[in-house]
């Protein structure tokens, strides 16, 4: 059963990699393991790994998207971030 977020994903808010999550680099991107809920999530692109790893450096997810993702792909990467928030891989900073 999926946990409902206490607050919905908002691209204009700051986000970070959840401190309970470890990333392991793989040829396809990375594996994200959450030590709290024991969930394993596949990050299937290097760009997504870079984006998730650097979220804490930006005042909003939108600014992180601007810095790391081509504009034409912002919508798909924002949806990926939303799914990662629902999986507790990232959380609001």
Image (cartoon, helix red, strand yellow):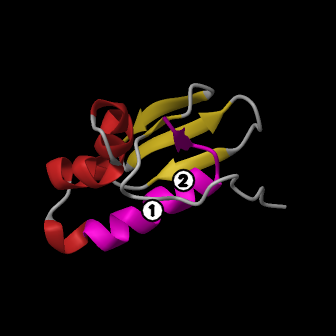
x and y percent of residue 93 in the render?
A: 48, 35
In front: 4, or 1? 4
The residue under the point 63% across, 56% down is: 86
Q: Main secondary structure of the magenta part?
A: helix
SS for tag 2? helix
Labels 2 & 1 near each other (Cβ < 8 A)? yes
x and y percent of residue 49 in the render?
A: 36, 43
Q: Quadrant of residue 56?
A: top left
What span is in magenta? 74-93
Q: Which residue is mark 2?
A: 84
Horizontally, is 80 left or right of 40 in the view? left
Disc 2 residue crowd, few under 14, some 14–19, many 20+, Cα 10 Å: many
> What number is the disc on residue 80?
1
SS for tag 1? helix
* Placement of 83 over or under 30, stated as above or below: below
Q: Quadrant of residue 11?
A: bottom left
The residue under the point 70% across, 28% down is: 35
In front: 52, or 11? 11
């Amino acid at each position: 059963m999926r946990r409902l977020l206490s607050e919905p994903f908002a691209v204009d808010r700051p986000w970070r990699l959840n401190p309970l999550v470890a990333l392991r680099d793989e040829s396809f991107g990375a594996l994200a393991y959450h030590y709290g809920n024991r969930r394993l999530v596949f990050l299937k692109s290097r760009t997504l790994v870079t984006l998730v790893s650097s979220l804490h450096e930006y005042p909003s997810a939108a600014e992180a998207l601007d810095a790391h993702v081509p504009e034409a792909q912002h919508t798909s990467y924002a949806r990926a971030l939303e799914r990662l928030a629902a999986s507790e891989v990232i959380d609001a900073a």
